[in-house]
């Protein structure tokens, strides 16, 4: 083999080594960029989830407060109805007791 052919082979091998190193460096940069983009996407998704959760919690608390108010009003209405019914029958109950005591 001639000296020129050996030099050409060595030059080609050196060129291949440089291209391989360049490709590895480019791949590492691409992986780093993809990891950074994924991390940023995760942070953004987490932020959106936290915002959505806060809105849902606020809406749920408002609905619970509204339901509690309605339940309280319903209970007050039922108590008033029971009290009115009891007051209405109070005289009859008192007369019944007096008759039982007197008539023995």
Image: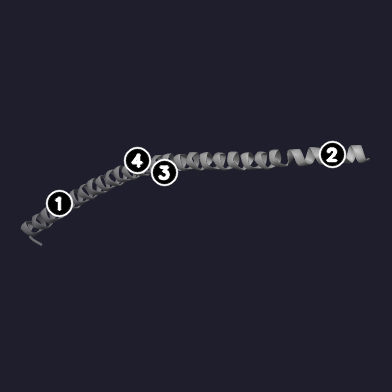
Q: Which residue lies under the disc numbered 1?
A: 14
Residue contact at pointers 4 and 3, CB within 8 angstroms? no
- Quadrant including the N terminus: bottom left
Q: Is residue 24 left or right of residue 2?
A: right
For the residues carrying marks 3 and 2, which lies nearer the camera in this image?
2
Q: Could you tell me which residue is drawn at 12 percent across and 57 percent down?
A: 9
Q: CA distance from mark 2 to mark 1?
A: 118 Å
Q: CA distance from mark 4 to mark 3?
A: 14 Å
Q: Which residue lies under the disc numbered 4?
A: 47
Q: Name the residue furthest bottom.
A: 1
Q: Name the residue furthest left.
A: 4
For the residues carrying marks 2 and 1, which lies nearer the camera in this image?
2
For marks 2 and 1, the one nearer the N-term is 1
For the residues carrying marks 3 and 1, which lies nearer the camera in this image?
3
**Label 3 SS:** helix
**Label 2 SS:** helix
Dot 3 alpha-carbon crowd within 10 angstroms: few under 14, some 14 to 19, many 20 or more: few
Q: CA distance from mark 2 to mark 4?
A: 71 Å
Q: Which residue lies under the disc numbered 3?
A: 56
Q: CA distance from mark 3 to mark 2?
A: 58 Å
For marks 3 and 2, the one nearer the N-term is 3
For marks 3 and 1, the one nearer the N-term is 1
Dot 2 alpha-carbon crowd within 10 angstroms: few under 14, some 14 to 19, many 20 or more: few
For marks 1 and 4, the one nearer the N-term is 1
């Amino acid at each position: 083999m001639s000296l020129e052919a050996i030099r050409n082979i060595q030059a080609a091998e050196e060129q291949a080594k440089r291209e391989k190193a360049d490709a590895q460096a480019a791949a590492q940069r691409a992986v780093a960029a993809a990891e950074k983009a994924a991390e940023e996407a995760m942070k953004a998704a987490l932020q959106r989830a936290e915002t959505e959760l806060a809105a849902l919690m606020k809406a749920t608390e408002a609905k619970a407060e509204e339901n509690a108010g309605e339940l309280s009003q319903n209970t007050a209405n039922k108590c008033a109805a029971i009290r009115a019914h009891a007051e209405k029958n109070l005289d009859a109950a008192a007369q019944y007791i007096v008759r039982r005591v007197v008539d023995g």
